[in-house]
Amino acid sequence: MSAAFLLTRIVLSFNDRSEDLRGELSAAALSPDGSLWVGSDEFLTLERLSPIEPGIYGNHQAFSLADFVDLCNRDDEIDIEGMDCANHYLWLTGSHSTKRKKPKGKKPEKDIKRLSETKTDVNRYILARIPIVGDTPFKSCSHPHDPDLQLSAACLQTEGESNILIAALAEDPHLAPFIASGLPSKDNGLDIEGLAVCGDRLFLGLRGPVLRGWAIILEIEIAETEPGILTLKELGKDGRHYRKYFVDLHGLGVRELCWYGEDLLILAGPTMALAGYTRLFRLKNALDLDEDSLFSQDNDRLELLFDLPFTPDRDNAEGLALFPCLGHENALLVVYDSPDANRKLGESAVFADVFRLP
């Protein structure tokens, strides 16, 4: 393992003065035109930032997701936790998780009751794609290099108050107990926090559950069965709609995924609500995987690259994107939830970090 080497920091400047936006960034993706797209835990929008001068992204514009795909309602948060750009689409995933109410610190008896209550925000069960041409998202448009090919926004098919992925996982021997119990995300419940896309193949990293120290990455393949609706392809001879890859991340869960050639970069952090180290791993030749697999620390395909700087209860690394920087074609941009006060700039800007990749 090498030490983390910080190449530089870049400024993300938002129009909105809301502390919730710059304070709760949870996903990032760089589109081919150079725009930086970020998502937040609390918003129903996608945020686009454009390069305005070296080291500064601004001209912030927010796009309502409801303008492109059907949401269950306009009230529940989506909890965007993963984003990626591939083949003129911006992909995003919600956490697919339930949540436990937080104590408010006013009346102990009410706080004790709140800790017994869980909630499901149905908008969290979203896995969607939106066409991006240049710096503009569309509900539907022609492919920029093939006018006969239509690009269309679409979501994974819903089923009840969730979707067909959750329905498939509800029969899984490892994950079914967590889905059936409705265990919240911060209690080691099901929580999708990573997304990496290659063609029709989607890799989903689970922050939880972590099973006896082993984190899980799911792979699915999608197809559009009708306009706006994505379904799951069968994978393997048993007709299952997903594959599972178990990775030993030193007891940590997956917080984000990012392609590095054919390797998969894995941002790993605590699955529970606690302060702990965040580490970057590389799973080599991930695109070669075609069956359920398990990768221990002794397996030369799983490599610990470096630990990110640790600030207790602040600077929680959440989003990753490959980023050209200072002569490095592929450095790593990292955006943070709960940024430290020193990371904030003025009333509406925040610094993101760019690290050298080994």
Image: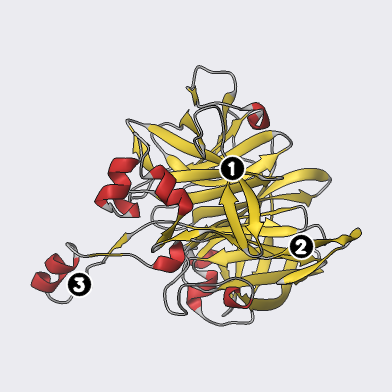
Please name whichever residue, 301 or 53, is drawn nearer the observer in this view of the structure.
301
The residue singled out by tag 3 in the image is 105
Alpha carbons under labels 2 and 1: distance apart: 20 Å
For marks 1 and 3, the one nearer the N-term is 3
Callout 3: SS? loop
Disc number lying in front (1 or 3): 1
* Residue at 58%, 18% in the rendered image: 300
Q: Position of residue 195 (x, y in %)?
A: 58, 49
Quadrant position of the N terminus in the picture:
top right
The residue singled out by tag 2 in the image is 151
Q: Position of residue 212 (x, y in %)?
A: 32, 30
Q: Is residue 69 positioned above or below 280 on the image?
A: below
Q: Position of residue 36 (x, y in %)?
A: 71, 63
Alpha carbons under labels 2 and 3: distance apart: 49 Å
* Residue at 48%, 74% in the rendered image: 20
Q: Is residue 117 positioned above or below 169 on the image?
A: below
Looking at the picture, which amino acid does disc 3 mark? Gly
* Residue 261 lies in quadrant: top right
Residue 114 in view here? yes
Disc number lying in front (2 or 1): 1
Q: Residues within 10 Å of mark 2 (few under 14, many from 20)?
A: many
Q: Is residue 172 positioned above or below 297 on the image?
A: below
* Residue at 28%, 42% in the rendered image: 177
For residue 104, side relative to residue 315 (left or right): left
For marks 2 and 1, the one nearer the N-term is 2
Looking at the picture, which amino acid does disc 2 mark? Leu
